[in-house]
Amino acid sequence: MLDKHLNLQLSDWMQQEDQPIILSSRIRLARNLENFVHPLMSDDETSEKVLQEVSDVLSEQFKAIVLRDLEVNDRQMLVIKHLVSKELLSHQSGATFLNDDESVSIMINEEDHIRIQVLGRDLSLDRLYEKAKEIDQLLDKKLTVSFDETLGYLTTCPTNIGTGLRASVMLHLPGLSIMKRMGRIAQAINRFGYTIRGIYGEGSQGLGHIYQVSNQLTLGKSEEAIINDLKQIVEQIITEEEGMRQRLLDYDYIETVDRINRSLGILKYARLISAEEASLRLSEVKMGIDMGIIPSQPFRFNELMVAIQPPFLNTINETLSINEKRAKILREHL
Amino acid sequence: MLDKHLNLQLSDWMQQEDQPIILSSRIRLARNLENFVHPLMSDDETSEKVLQEVSDVLSEQFKAIVLRDLEVNDRQMLVIKHLVSKELLSHQSGATFLNDDESVSIMINEEDHIRIQVLGRDLSLDRLYEKAKEIDQLLDKKLTVSFDETLGYLTTCPTNIGTGLRASVMLHLPGLSIMKRMGRIAQAINRFGYTIRGIYGEGSQGLGHIYQVSNQLTLGKSEEAIINDLKQIVEQIITEEEGMRQRLLDYDYIETVDRINRSLGILKYARLISAEEASLRLSEVKMGIDMGIIPSQPFRFNELMVAIQPPFLNTINETLSINEKRAKILREHL
């Protein structure tokens, strides 16, 4: 069963046709155990105890993966699939508990002792939150979770204190990105305590025009309100993205059609391609399909964006450079 | 019959499969009539008389085209097909006499009264020269051609004096061009009185990596020697081009394969393309076919290089921009 989590680019929860604009949603709850020092301060022995305690509760329902047992490349795969964070990799007792379709990943000994993550498609954040809450209650029943009557859940970093909730939505925003509106959008949503950034965190601004919107404030607002406001913000961003796409059709029609078709042609013919270029071209093809500019075709953007990353390319057993392997994968898929 | 000379991109003499490297050969003889002032100095009446005299000799065997009778766009087409020179267009009594397959074009009232041009494929310059000499003898029989016992044929520009012969070969040299060897080649052949330049003359350096090699000296050497030396020089350049292609295969194999395939992909998918980009991409695809990197396919480089020029694109009766028409033509051909 472990093989599956490592070898498939696409988690089972993603096995549906791509949607326009909304790529995925995520709920994350940060929790800590009261009788243990928090992970950044703890020694190996303590961390192992935390892992053991949590494991006793979760290992029946979930598949445990202790990262130190994996090859380096396999760890990277879990990061690329958003099942564990980069930060978790550096922790000696870092582990995750996955459900079968990989929509649930419960990270242990990350910045907090426990980070419950539930992933899903579309904007069904409420449903994802319900699922996370179930797991939270399961843990709460068996373990003593740090909680303060006034502050709420206590977390390692004060920015998570209160609900410990991070709700986020991954969006495909080529229209806003091409028309250079992302800066303005970021400013606007910051005022409401929300933030927008590139696909693999701060460092990777808008790779493939993919952006993640999430709440920054975890305190002073109920979980339901945080989620509800995020949904409204996302719907507003979607409206703006659609407006930009319409502008491209109205004012730059042939340039847009040319750009999208060239990207398709290059993906089908290139023999060497960097991750940056591939992301951009895949993004433009997705936009072209979603806008009806190129015929609808079996095209899994989410899957391809993962398949072109080095951890997956490294598993191809041929004496090709990474850029050759990437080009090969793309030719085969398109 | 005139329609044919104007509407087909490809002259009949070119109706064969493309060859690698050698695109076409050309012989040109410059002649003037003794009893008329040379065209650059002559008035309209004199030029008309020249045209009339020549017409009396040629109009039975050749189709006369007087440029002032054509639409502007049709004149441009003849230039693109190398049947008349740009310079001829500006002359009030400019005309040409064509044979049926367009391998012969006899320009009247260009820089000289008469310029006999014979075009062909491969390196058969001797055969082309024989054909030009036949026409020269026909004219000589009926008209008084300016000739000096010491200097030879008298021409308007002293650089043509003597034989009045310009022998040239059009070559496809992407290897030398990509590897930046053209400067050195030009220097080397200049020492022997030969020159190399871009496809449509000095101004268009190496468009599509196409270069024309020709003699500069017309005096002090027999026609046969001029042609023979040119053939040797061309064979030397071909050897160097083949060497450069081999180097690309040996040292930059995957980059070369990528570059060629991307060009093919872009030609098949672009919706907007400039003449410069199209020429370059067609050139790379031709190189790819000739090097066996992409499968041999019906691909007429000579024809496409003409078909993508504005005079031919202007005849497409659709409300598209010129760059859209060019992309459309290319998609349809590839």
Image (cartoon, coloured by chain):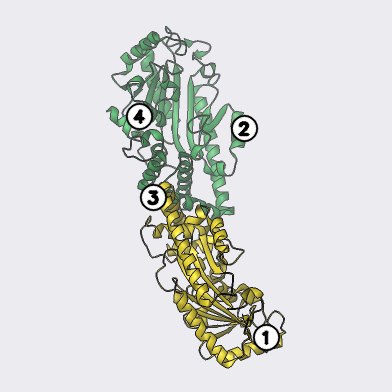
Chain colours: A green, B yellow
The reply to whether dot 3 and dot 4 touch (C-beta < 8 Å) is no
Label 2 and label 1: CA atoms lie apart by: 74 Å
Can you tell which mark lies on residue A102?
4
Mark 3 is on which residue type? Gln
Can you tell which mark lies on residue A187?
2
Mark 2 element type: helix
Depth check: give the residue in front, B84 or B124. Answer: B124
Give the residue number, with chain letter if any, for mark 1.
Answer: B47
Label 1 and label 4: CA atoms lie apart by: 87 Å
Mark 1 element type: helix
Mark 4 element type: loop
B221 lies left or right of A321:
right
Task: Say yes or no: labels 2 and 4 on the same chain.
Answer: yes
Depth check: give the residue in front, A8 or B309. Answer: B309
How dense is the environment of label 2, judged by Cα within 10 Å: few (below 14), some, or many (20 and up)?
A: few
Location of the C terminus of chain B (image quadrant): bottom left
Can you tell which mark lies on residue A297?
3
The percent coordinates of residue A104 (x first, y second) are 37, 26
Label 2 and label 4: CA atoms lie apart by: 33 Å
Label 3 and label 1: CA atoms lie apart by: 65 Å
Task: Say yes or no: labels 3 and 1 on the same chain.
Answer: no
